[in-house]
Amino acid sequence: MNRSIISFRLGLGAIAVIGCLAMSLSVHADQSPNFILCMGDDHGWDETAYNGHPHLKTPVLDEMAAAGLRLDRFYSASPVCSPTRGSVMTGRNPNRYGTFSAGWSIRPEEVTVAQLLSKAGYLCGHFGKWHLGPVKAESPTNPGAMGFDQWVSHDNFFEMNPFLSRNGGPPQRFEGESSEIVVDETIRFIREAKEKRRRFLAVVWFGSPHEPYSGLEKDLALYDDLPQKYQERVVRLTSMETGLPTQRPQREVLRERYAEITAMDRAMGKLRTFLDESGLRPNTLVWYCGDNGTPPEGAATVPFRGVKGAVYEGGVRVPGVIEWPAGIPQPRVSDVNSVTSDILPTLCDLAGQPLLDRPLDGISLKPLIEGKMTERPRPTCFWNYDTRHETKNKPEPYIDPKLQEGTTPLAKKAGNLFTRNFNNFRHPQITADDFTGPRAILDNRYKLVVSDRAGKPLSKELFDVREDPAEEKNLIQSKPEIAEKLERELRAWQESVLESLTGADYR
């Protein structure tokens, strides 16, 4: 055989090998999973049967925890809702962009997980509670402005028969149980993505179990026999009838709260069944978590110190579970610390999408999913920024206040409104007062809690949360070296956060 024929055949062989390699790489790229991020509103760590709750029935979350990756030490980035949701969207602590507390919007310059995954070809949808600014069309921080292709969303929380905005349009009343409504809209979106042969990101943020509470009769009936001891405690919450504060026996309140959690759990089941029937479940990663700890009126069995609003474990430790049959074929339980800020870097890592060159507080949990991470490589920080300091000097609004006015009605009245408005302010300079407010730093064993609100003495507490999860034994005197090291790290982190707050990351 002459050399030219041999060369030709070798060339064809090389082309075939290169072609197969390219096809292999293409198939590998196409195997990046779909993502569904589900979040309960005010759903605390112990409020699942799989975490040992004595009364709650959560069969679907229990199945997910038994089949997937159960994150036993999962945390919300904040002990309240809006900031935690901002951390999911950005991978950054919400104080970096002025989302300090409930009703403080995100900033338009932030880059979200939806914007990043859109670059990787994902179709992105948001369904349910947004709470990072108004969802109306003209808002510069609505889901569409922050990277979502479509949304059926509410400015804040919602109950039965909710009012939701579709793609920024006027609020519409949806009849039915709210968790099921949100899941039905999510299923519609996923069907559309499948028809278009697009990978998808669906963010499903339920309105439950946030107060005021209500429930279907079949769910309420499950909790008719709660212990009588709960009847003896009277709790404060919102009246479904008036939207104003009222007081009721906790037993009645828990019955309704637990009914909402069970309905939300059932909606999760409907979503999983659809994924099964449509053939999407094997390569769809479903991540469920809460946005903060149990609120005071619902605190009956919390095994930790504190509740919603506190940087103690009861305020920031929440249920967390990841189910992804193709990527997590065997069930596992992890006690590695993880946090809602980790969601963005994890999804981008799994999708092969580069991150923005901007300070992130989360890390990729891909090694944890793969069973290769046994400890978190750096601490996690929490900070209840003192918003009274932020507003006392009449700061300049970051966004036109008219654009920050909400439109979707809710059952809880605030002032004279049954809607919610948002704030965000410019913060051009850093002062000593900016560092105040309850805060904490958590490494793989120890947690330092510092509090110095205006008019109150400075307090410092150190806990070994592995040995003392209830944070009952203060080790600040017996382990001063550890406390001092953590305090230095916490201060350095605060300096970084405040630098971001000035807008430096956008320049």
Image (tube, helix red, strand yellow):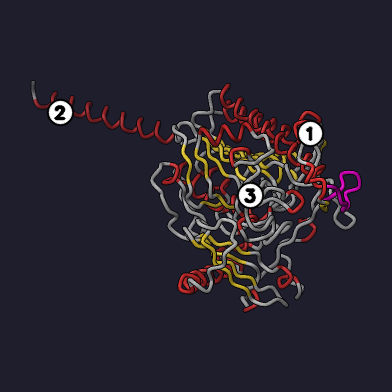
Q: Is residue 386 above or below residue 319?
A: below
Horizontal side of 150 relative to 339 (left or right) equals right
Mark carried by residue 43? none
Front one among 504 and 43: 43
Mark carried by residue 220? 1
Q: What span is in magenta?
A: 237-249
How many residues crowd mark 3 within 10 Å: few (<14), some (14–19), many (20+)?
many
Q: Earlier in the sequence, mark 1 or mark 2?
A: 2
At a point 75% along the width and 57% down the height, the residue shown is 422
Mark 3 or mark 2, whichever is nearer to me: 3
Q: Is residue 351 above or below residue 463?
A: above
Whether pointer 1 and pointer 3 mark residues with C-beta atoms closer than 8 Å, the reply is: no
Q: Quadrant of the C terminus?
A: bottom right
Mark 3: secondary structure: loop
x and y percent of residue 327 in the render?
45, 35
Mark 2: secondary structure: helix
| Residue 418 within the segment the image draws in magenta | no
Q: Look at label 2 and name its amino acid.
A: Ser
At a point 80% along the width and 34% down the height, the residue shown is 174
Q: CA distance from mark 1 to mark 2?
A: 78 Å
Q: Is residue 365 above or below residue 395?
A: above
x and y percent of residue 371 in the render?
40, 43
Q: Which residue is mark 2?
A: 7
Front one among 55 and 279: 55
x and y percent of residue 114 in the render?
58, 45
Horizontal side of 221 relative to 348 (left or right) equals right
